[in-house]
Amino acid sequence: MPNVADTLSPQNVPSNNPSGQIPLRQPLVEMRQIYKTFKSPAGEFTALKNINACFYRGEFVSVVGKSGSGKSTLVNMITGIDRPTSGSVYVDGVCIQELGESAMSAWRGRNLGIVFQFYQLLPMLSLLENVVLPMDLCDRFPPTEREERARALLRLVGLEDYADQLPAEVSGGQQQSAAIARALANDPPILIADEPTGNLDSRTAEAVFDIFIGLREQGKTILMVTHDRSLAQRADRMLEIADGVLISDRLNGEGSLS
Amino acid sequence: MDSPALPDRQPIIRARQVVKVYPAGGRPVQALKGVNLDVYAGEFVAIQGKSGAGKTTLVQILTGVDRLTGGEVWVDGAALHRFDENQLAFWRGRNVGVIFQSFYLMPTLSILDNVVLPIDLCGDYHPRRSRELALELLRQVGLEEHAYKLPSQISGGQQQRVAIARALANDPPLIIADEPTGRLDSVNAENIFQIFQSLVNGGKTVLMVTHDEGLASRASRRLILADGEIVADDFVPISVSEATNKTDD
Amino acid sequence: MVRPRVRKILADLWGNRMRSLLVIASITVGLFAIGVIATLHRVMTEDLRLGYAAANPPNIRIVAAPFDQGLVDHLKKVEGVRQAEGLRGFDARLESRPGEWIGIEFKAVPQDETRQIAQVRLVEGKWPPGDREVVIEQYKIADVNAQIGEWITIELPSGKRRPLKVVGVVSDQTVGAFASGPGFFLAPVQGYVNQETVEWLQQDLPYTYNMLYITVDGDSNDETRLWEVANRVRDEMEHAGGTVINIAVRGSYDHPNRRYLEALAIVLVLLGFLIVFLSGFLITNTMQAIIQQQIQQIGILKTLGSRRYQIILLYMGLILVFGAIAALTAAPLAYRVAFQRVVPLAKTINMAYRGPRFLPHVILLQVGMGLLVPQLAALAPILQGSRISVREALSGVRESQQGRRGWFDRMILRLRGFSRPTLISIRNTFRRKGRLLLTLTTLSLGGAIFIATFNVQVSMDRYVDMVSRYFLADVNLTLARPERVLEINQVLSDLPGVAYVEAWGTARSEMILPDGATGENVQLLAPPVDSRLVDPVMIEGRWVKSGDQNAIVLNERFMSDFPNLRVGDVLRLRLNGKETDWIIVGYFQLAGRSSGLLAYTSRESLLRVINQPDKAMTYRIVAEGKDLSKEEQEALGRAIEARMAARGIRVLDVTTGSYLSSSAAQGFAALTGFLLFLASLTALVGSIGLTGAMSLNVMERTREIGILRAIGATNRILLKLILTEGMLIGFLSWIIAVLAAFPISKLLSDSISQALFGNPSTLAYTPTGFLLWLGAVLILSALASILPARNAARLTIREVLAYE
Ligand SMILES: Nc1ncnc2c1ncn2[C@@H]1O[C@H](COP(=O)(O)OP(=O)(O)OP(=O)(O)O)[C@@H](O)[C@H]1O
Ligand SMILES: Nc1ncnc2c1ncn2[C@@H]1O[C@H](COP(=O)(O)OP(=O)(O)OP(=O)(O)O)[C@@H](O)[C@H]1O
Ligand SMILES: [Mg+2]
Ligand SMILES: [Mg+2]
């Protein structure tokens, strides 16, 4: 299995590269020596052990690993949903641990689109309203255009007919699709998705993947956790985690990072 | 398609003209449009279909978790369409192991207690034996070291496996699972499939909704739902499917 | 190993301590209020009756010309008489501060205290008094202005002054007991001396009795029987050569302040009912909130095969723990507070408080409410949760609700122009209409009671102000004997500071009952017909006006004692031994039904009857300045007294108008204070209820807060969201409370007024209650929403979202 440093392509040299080469590109996301230990009455559990990784603008990265290996925990470090026990995370030059909860929330709303493993839609709002909400919260797009945009996003994920249903009134897969639409609402530069296709049949999953490819084409950065190796291998780059350790980080194929 | 192949065997599940309509705020959604289905003991059925096809709805009807709008369902001789909520609950607790798409664990109970709970509620509860049984089930799904955590302290895939262990706690003859491997990596998914397979070999019946082509193709029977109807069913008489499974192993 | 289902209960209790605490606090405060009210009610009604009876009060009091022990012994043999005791009573003045004289009523007691009737209870010092010693009744001890061991100066009607040493304080249940007197609150200071002291004080008279106390055999509460015995005694007395001046009767349980207490009791019962309701709603609301949060878990339990009885038992167990903790906390707390609160009240209404005691029925009520009501309240949602399909329970969307959305839901869904976060709040508020309704009811009821008590209090205060309208004069002067009006007018008119003098007639009379028998004593006041010094509060009819012949207006006591007497009827009175008919032209309201029988007529009518055209004993004097302070009135009183002394005119009594109206209002003041206490009690229930309801509401939102955080909500937005929802509910409840406060105020105020005066009140409204409650609602809803929201926001989002 290739070593993490070995697999880094020349243009992907991270800023903390000990070789002293001048980095050709600034990483968009940089994780340095991340450790995460959970304490519970049942004992301590280290879910992440010395994670170092950088992601660059326009990359489509997939993260794979066994269940319980630490994928969600890793993703939570980048989204600021959880804080590392030690180490630091920079996103677009911002050291996100240094932000307060409120500031982090605002920052997150503008810069990240997140798809959660458990959709996390607001139960009292219709799917449409769920998609409009991030725009309202971060005051993105003129208020009159928001609904229009939300409808377009729902159409994109095939839910135009379900716009006015409450989350509890649609199927699991439909909720997941709605969560993807919501993540795209603010047109964020970075999209982070935790198993976005876990509840989708292969055809719908394919459609979602195509959306992601399309976003990458627009220059967005995408980080996707998945169990589906065939999907994972179609991303530009694939990280693999086992027992909280980053065991592999490699590029898939050629030319996608021009 | 729904004619039983072996006349001497009664189906364990018999659904006739099952219709389910959700009121959905004045714009009714017909999620099942007259489904007929016979499943025989010892079958391993995979249900597939696009998102929104009605798989969860069907599963909920067959487990008595939801009520039908029309039609009839017998499971193991019990006429579910005539049961009230209370009878359904007890019947389900003893006869069916249910695994939900969202797992629905009890948030305030430890993983272990979650698995013991069904035994406490309607099984043969014995403080020490039940606990050991639960630990054994957790070991099978690879979670023994997490036994004393709360559901919120384990990963999504781990929660899914807890739900599977819980469904097996009362050793029910029928297991109905809604995408039990949806959040699992291939190794764990394979492990779960093996568990189901060995249950089927032991004479139990398993009904599993899945999106995974590979797993579905290895079940003894595949159903495909589309728009609330069964559009494909490769039903083969049970003896043949048993033979196929034997050769697979 | 503990069974998982039991563990679930423990986890629910302990896992969310804040929530458990709120639930328990909500139940506790309700039970506490109920306990306090039930205890007060029980103790007050019981102790007043029993305490009075325990003093062995006289059933008959006869005032007569001096008689001796021989006659008393003779009268003991009259049929129906159980005990008879003679005693000596007389009025005097005492110097409360240098130059300041107030009235005192003395009773002589035997040296060896062999008295059996109207026993007093020693509060402090010693009893019975020795030679040249005096013991004072506790109620007006403050007016005496002397400690035990100090000396006071007495001035007798003859003008002689004597020092007496204060040696003790007692409580006498019979103060104000007889209808001819001014009633308890207007009664003067009571002093007790022994026979030797009396002889020393009144050397001119040999020691004799002028009053007879009698208790009767058998039923001592039947007034007609009491009158029968009284008349037999009178006949016997007159037969033996005695002269009966007047007779009064009273039942053995009939404490002088009974009516007053009835008013209090009615307030307590009414408020008690309201608070039981309020607590019931509060507990129900809390339980529904708790169970509502558990509907999903009930769904899970059902998928695992749990039968209805198991679910019910499970949650009943949980609720039992809540209820039991609440009852255990509330009962002793209520006990303490209630008995603490009784003490000052007992003093103001002269109740023989018998000390804290265990009241089984109160405990039973509390435990019953604490254990039963929560169960009943929770049963409906639990049953509902176990009746709906598992899918509905799990998803939180009810098919029945889903099917028919009412106009309201459609309106809420169609709301536009609000930002999404505001929409979330609005929709959250109206999502569970049943719950919302319950919460609103609880909060509004609490608020309405709170507001109402303020209104009632103000009405009482206003009435206290009205009382002073009978005492408009700055100084009331009573002379030792009638003097010529012209002369007094002359003496006073050139005194600096005096603006105006009115001579008032006063007389004591006896009612002549339709069958010719003598009835109760009636105090007659007769201001000039054009008097500027009375501004009466009429209940019915009109005041005396010029041109009237023998017109009379009666106080509220007549209304309750003689309900058959109507305006236009004739009342026969014996005055100066002569029977006269008077025409009732109206009823007025003064110090309540516990005061004595009091009537006003015009001085002109009175003079015509008693034939004493130009003399008067009482004078009312108005000062030149307006609205004199108490001190200024006292100064004027001293100047008047000095002037009288200089002219050699003997003065019996000089009292300031403010002293009179304040003692008349004293009873109301106690009532007002009590109302304030009850108001704070409801405010407590309301506030805790509000806090609990809001906080539980926000706790249900923990997950939503997490999601909002995750998709970009800043603190400000979260705050706005939570506050909008809390304040919306709070404000809605305030509006309803305001509306509900009107009928509740009316109800409370009418029942108090009915009990005190025998007629519905004139209700006053004050913005105080309305505004205070608005402030409380807004501040509390804000606090109660923000605190749990802050807790929720402090959890890392991972914790909130980790679990589906
Ligand atoms: N409570 C509800 N009210 C209204 N419509 C509903 C409700 N639940 C499900 N539906 C609709 O019924 C259809 C079938 O839903 P179901 O959950 O059975 O799909 P599914 O096959 O399980 O899909 P998935 O693979 O996405 O979980 C969908 O179109 C869904 O939108
Ligand atoms: N709060 C917690 N306390 C203790 N251990 C935890 C906690 N949260 C997560 N873990 C453990 O950390 C490990 C990594 O969890 P994580 O959720 O990152 O896994 P994952 O790779 O996303 O798995 P999955 O594919 O099943 O979602 C798991 O073994 C889990 O049990
Ligand atoms: Mg995960
Ligand atoms: Mg489904």
Image: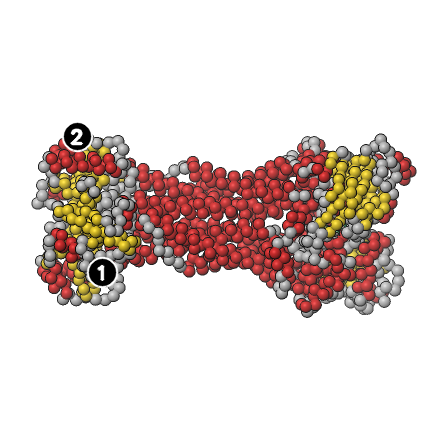
Could you tell me residue A136's position as x and y percent?
A: 66, 64
Could you tell me residue B245's position as x and y percent?
A: 88, 38
**Labelled disc at residue A252:** none
Which residue carries the number 2 mark?
C77
Cα distance between the residues tagged 2 and 1: 50 Å
Q: Residue at x 38, y 54 (%)?
A: C456
Label 1 packing within 10 angstroms: few (<14), some (14-19), many (20+): some
Task: Tell me the quarter of the picture where residue C291 sits.
Answer: top right
Quarter the N terminus of chain B occupies:
top right
Residue C24 higher or lower than A60, as above or below: above
Q: Is residue A52 or residue B28 the one in the foreground? A: B28
Identify the residue at the far right of this view.
B247
Q: Which residue is drawn at 35% across and 53% down?
A: C761
Residue C384 in view here? yes
Looking at the picture, which amino acid does disc 2 mark?
Answer: Lys
Q: Is residue C401 or residue A186 the one in the foreground? A: C401
User: How many marks do you count on the picture?
Assistant: 2
Could you tell me residue C381's position as x and y percent?
A: 59, 44
**Labelled disc at residue C533:** 1
Could you tell me residue C620's position as x and y percent?
A: 19, 59
The chain under label 2 reads: C
Helix, strand, or loop for circle 2?
loop
Query: Would residue C474 appear left or right of A184 to someone viewing this image?
Result: left
Query: Would residue C625 appear left or right of B50 to someone viewing this image?
Result: left
The chain under label 1 reads: C
